[in-house]
């Protein structure tokens, strides 16, 4: 009952106003006050500052600078192998599975549309039909930079305005089509395994979503904005390179096309993720052909 009341309260909460206000405060340089807030946050959420490049809270001029802190070199070893994929973020796998009939699982009893998640583009959604998705929730204590699972060349970026519900597991259980309702930034990369979508989903008190090539993308206007990147100087990123970051936590959703990858056995619902660890492997042509033959029999 308490969970339902907490979620119901979010419907009447002025989520955007609150998020913008807290975003402003999080970017403020307030000296000792900022340091005190950071230290309280570290204690409450048990943040492991031994991994941070700078472990001293006094050296962060703003809460946002602390929240998007860089890690020490080697803190997140990158999975080796030319045909491996790396996990993009620290967090926890909230859902994983196939994209069936344009639907992705949100929680028990809830699913949502891939087409709506990606901004209403049916042709784009069809590129991921019968593919696979992985949803990773980032908690407040996690490292909040987002990295590439695989080498990729950016094709399209879409900013989709929307709600700012919390994206924690409780809210996902009770708010229908949560991830297709919240503000989000959709990025589409062309990779060695075909198209890959990385969707960065906003949430309550998420001050902004940034990418390394465009800076702050959200918050933005009240209409869908699309950028195409087929230019003489394309944006190409290597596996493990940073592609974006959240100023306060949220969720990343990965989508791959049909028979594109084989997910690692360790990537299961409820499992903790660490950026750079093993996400999966390329599907070989022989594996795909063998599966096609089995389906046709």
Image (cartoon, helix red, strand yellow):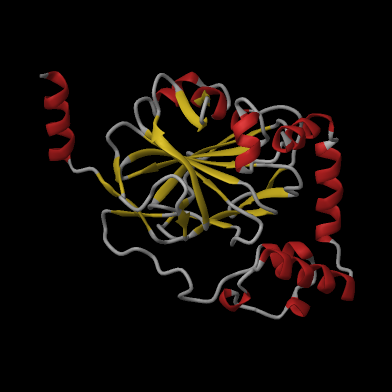
Residue that appears at 85% across and 53% down? 24
Quarter-wise, where is residue 247 in the image? bottom right
Question: In the figure, 258 relative to 58: above or below?
Answer: above
Residue that appears at 63% across and 47% down? 250
In depth, the one of 191 and 292 nearer the eye is: 292
Question: In the figure, 64 relative to 111: above or below?
Answer: below
Question: In the figure, 116 relative to 136: above or below?
Answer: above
Place of residue 159 in the rendered image (x, y in percent of width and height, measured from the top left) = 64, 35
Left of 87 or right of it: where is 286? left
In depth, the one of 278 and 217 nearer the eye is: 278
Quarter-wise, where is residue 46 in the image? bottom right
Place of residue 281 in the rendered image (x, y in percent of width and height, measured from the top left) = 28, 50
Left of 285 or right of it: where is 111? right
Place of residue 44 in the rendered image (x, y in percent of width and height, measured from the top left) = 73, 65
Question: In the figure, 225 relative to 102: above or below?
Answer: below
> How many marks can you see?
0
Do we see residue 130 in this rendering?
yes
Check the picture and name the quadrant holding the N terminus: top right
Check the picture and name the quadrant holding the C terminus: top left
Residue that appears at 79% across and 67% down? 62
Place of residue 15 in the rendered image (x, y in percent of width and height, measured from the top left) = 81, 38
Do we see residue 31 in this rendering?
no
In depth, the one of 58 and 91 nearer the eye is: 91
């Amino acid at each position: 009952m308490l969970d339902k009341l907490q979620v119901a309260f979010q419907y009447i909460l002025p989520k955007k106003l609150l998020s913008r206000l807290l975003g402003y405060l999080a970017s403020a340089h307030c000296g000792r006050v900022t340091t005190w807030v950071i230290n309280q946050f570290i204690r409450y959420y048990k943040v492991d500052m031994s991994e941070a490049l700078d472990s001293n809270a006094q050296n962060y001029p703003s809460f946002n600078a602390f929240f998007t802190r860089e890690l020490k070199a080697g803190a997140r070893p990158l999975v080796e192998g030319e045909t491996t994929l790396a996990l993009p973020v620290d967090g926890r796998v909230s859902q994983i599975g196939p994209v069936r009939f344009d639907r992705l699982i949100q929680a028990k009893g809830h699913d949502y549309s891939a087409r709506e998640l990606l901004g209403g583009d049916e042709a784009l959604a069809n590129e991921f039909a019968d593919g696979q998705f992985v949803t990773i929730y980032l908690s407040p204590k996690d490292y909040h930079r987002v990295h590439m699972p695989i080498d990729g060349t950016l094709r399209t970026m879409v900013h989709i305005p929307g709600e700012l519900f919390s994206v924690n597991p409780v809210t996902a259980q009770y708010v229908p089509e949560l991830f297709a309702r919240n503000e989000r930034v959709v990025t589409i990369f062309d990779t060695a395994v075909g198209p890959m979508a990385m969707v960065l989903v906003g949430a309550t008190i998420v001050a902004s979503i940034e990418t390394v090539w465009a800076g702050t993308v959200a918050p933005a206007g009240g209409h869908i904005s699309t950028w195409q990147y087929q230019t003489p100087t394309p944006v190409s990123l290597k596996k493990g390179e940073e592609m974006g970051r959240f100023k306060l936590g949220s969720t990343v959703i990965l989508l791959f096309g049909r028979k594109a990858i084989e997910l690692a056995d360790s990537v299961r619902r409820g499992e903790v993720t660490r950026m750079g660890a093993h996400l999966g492997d390329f599907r070989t042509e022989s594996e795909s052909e063998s599966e096609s033959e089995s389906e046709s029999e």
